[in-house]
Image (cartoon, rainbow, N blue to C red):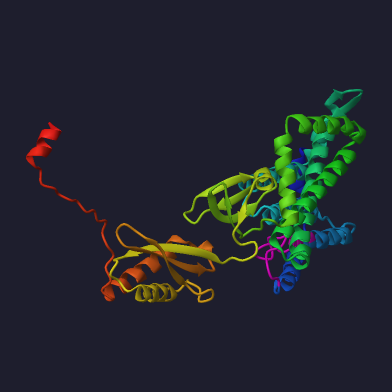
């Protein structure tokens, strides 16, 4: 009799309705507990997920209840259905754990979704093998396949189990780092840049520790990694010094807070807002939508203008020329009033107009005014000021002169003709 036929035969017994009722009762109790715990939740979590039952808590509670019922009823009647539900709930708990952790740690990553789906398929496949009774034979066959690595022989089963153990440990490290970032760092560290670097350091440290624990659990001698560490140090010192410099510069920027997310900066003639500070580069977005990826080493070694480090206010100027017969005092009053009447122009410091040059075509004035939100654009507010100036000057009858040139015509005499010829 095959394992599948034996399972079907075990499921066909008189106590099946009681098993179904117990299983449904366990699921209902697990759902009630999750619903009660998730009524006041503030955001999506690993335990409760998006809709309470898609988190890790529901399959864990259901698994505990089903396992307890299985142990209580094991000596009284056949409990094939409850025994079948245990591996299914274990697989569901593993899938929920992987899915929720990747969703919280990498909310916008497509690779995380692919890893989640791949793990789901593998988990359900292993569950099916477990249920039909093929898994023990498959494990024995994998254990018989051995590889010679150095002086030790490692079976295929050890490699697979070690890979799964390493994956689970790394996912647990991601979960702990995400919990620390969301529950601890957001309350203890209010600065976004410091919170980001702290989260990156914690995540990197936990991943390294988790990876070392996973290797130790598999049986890998960690002393052998010292040779790899030395080689990696030599590689960084010679071939990866630029990359290493960018990473170190990224941490220096985040710790010193010379640049912060949201600052307006000018780097090598490119001006924009700092959107994100990665460990290797900084992303800057200009007002026209263009984005610049600047290596962190450049931000450390070169001159950078931080337009919002001390004061976000910015001085803008616009030039205006009027005719020579215009009243200078009246022109100054009209220019200042036009700038002050624009919504984004600050009243303190107040706008001012200065006569800066006696031009070839007219009197040239400079209108100076301040704004407090350069991130919302500079060209648009300058355009509003220019339109207000144009309307004021036209309403007052003050001309904006066109370029003028004076041409003198002289009569040509007979003596001049002879000189020219």
Q: Is residue 50 magenta?
A: yes
Farthest left residue in view: 414
Q: Residue at x 82, y 63 (%)?
A: 65
Q: Quadrant of residue 420?
A: top left
Residue 130 x/y as whole percent: 77, 43
Q: How many numbered marks does the figure carry?
A: 0
Vertical relation: 69 (above or below) 220:
below
- Left or right, residue 217 beside residue 302: right
Residue 64 x/y as whole percent: 83, 60
384 or 19, which is in the foreground? Answer: 384
219 or 209, which is in the foreground? Answer: 209
Q: Quadrant of residue 165?
A: top right
- Left or right, residue 276 beside residue 339: right
- Left or right, residue 311 beside residue 149: left
Residue 95 visible in the snapshot: no
Which secondary structure is most common in the magenta stretch?
loop
Q: Residue at x 76, y 70 (%)?
A: 33
**Quarter of the image with the N terminus in it:** top right
Residue 418 x/y as whole percent: 10, 34
**Magenta residue span:** 41-60
**Quarter of the image with the C terminus in it:** top left
- Left or right, residue 405 beside residue 369: left
Q: Is residue 161 magenta?
A: no
Vertical relation: 165 (above or below) 318:
above
Residue 345 visible in the snapshot: yes
Residue 367 x/y as whole percent: 43, 67
244 or 15, which is in the foreground? Answer: 244
């Amino acid at each position: 009799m095959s394992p599948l036929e034996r399972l079907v035969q075990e499921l066909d017994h008189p106590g099946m309705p009681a098993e179904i009722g117990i299983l449904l009762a366990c699921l209902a109790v697990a759902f009630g507990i999750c619903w009660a715990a998730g009524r006041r939740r503030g955001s999506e979590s690993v335990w409760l997920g998006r809709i309470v039952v898609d988190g890790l808590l529901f399959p864990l509670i259901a698994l505990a209840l089903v396992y307890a019922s299985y142990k209580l009823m094991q000596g009284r009647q056949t409990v094939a259905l409850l025994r079948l539900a245990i591996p299914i709930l274990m697989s569901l708990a593993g899938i929920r754990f992987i899915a929720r952790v990747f969703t919280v740690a990498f909310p916008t990553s497509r690779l995380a979704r692919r890893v989640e789906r791949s793990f789901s398929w593998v988990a359900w496949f292993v569950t099916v093998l477990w249920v039909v009774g093929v898994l023990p034979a498959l494990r024995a066959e994998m254990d018989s396949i051995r590889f010679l690595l150095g002086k030790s022989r490692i079976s295929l089963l050890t490699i697979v189990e070690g890979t799964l153990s390493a994956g689970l440990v790394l996912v647990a490290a991601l979960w702990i780092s995400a919990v620390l970032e969301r529950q601890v760092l957001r309350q203890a560290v209010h600065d976004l840049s410091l919170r980001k670097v702290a989260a990156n350091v914690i995540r990197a440290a936990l991943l390294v520790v988790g990876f070392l624990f996973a290797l130790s659990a598999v049986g890998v001698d960690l002393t052998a990694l010292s040779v790899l560490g030395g080689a990696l140090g030599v590689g960084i010192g010679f071939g990866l010094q630029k990359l290493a410099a960018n990473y170190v510069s990224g941490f220096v920027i985040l710790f010193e807070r010379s640049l912060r997310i949201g600052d307006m900066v000018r780097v090598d003639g490119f001006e924009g807002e700092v959107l994100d500070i990665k460990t290797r580069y900084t992303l800057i977005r200009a007002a026209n939508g263009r984005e610049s990826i600047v290596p962190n080493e450049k931000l450390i070694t070169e001159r950078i203008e931080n337009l919002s480090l001390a004061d976000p206010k910015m001085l803008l100027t616009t030039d205006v020329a009027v005719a020579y017969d215009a009243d200078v005092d009246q022109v100054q009053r009209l220019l200042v009033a036009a700038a002050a009447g624009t919504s984004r122009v600050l009243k303190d410091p107040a706008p001012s107009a200065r006569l800066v040059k006696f031009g070839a075509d007219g009197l040239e004035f400079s209108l100076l005014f301040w704004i407090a939100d350069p991130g919302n654009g500079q060209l648009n507010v300058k355009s509003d000021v220019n339109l207000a100036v144009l309307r004021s000057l036209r309403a007052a009858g003050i001309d904006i002169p066109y370029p003028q040139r004076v041409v003198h015509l002289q009569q040509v005499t007979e003596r001049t003709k002879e000189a020219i010829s």
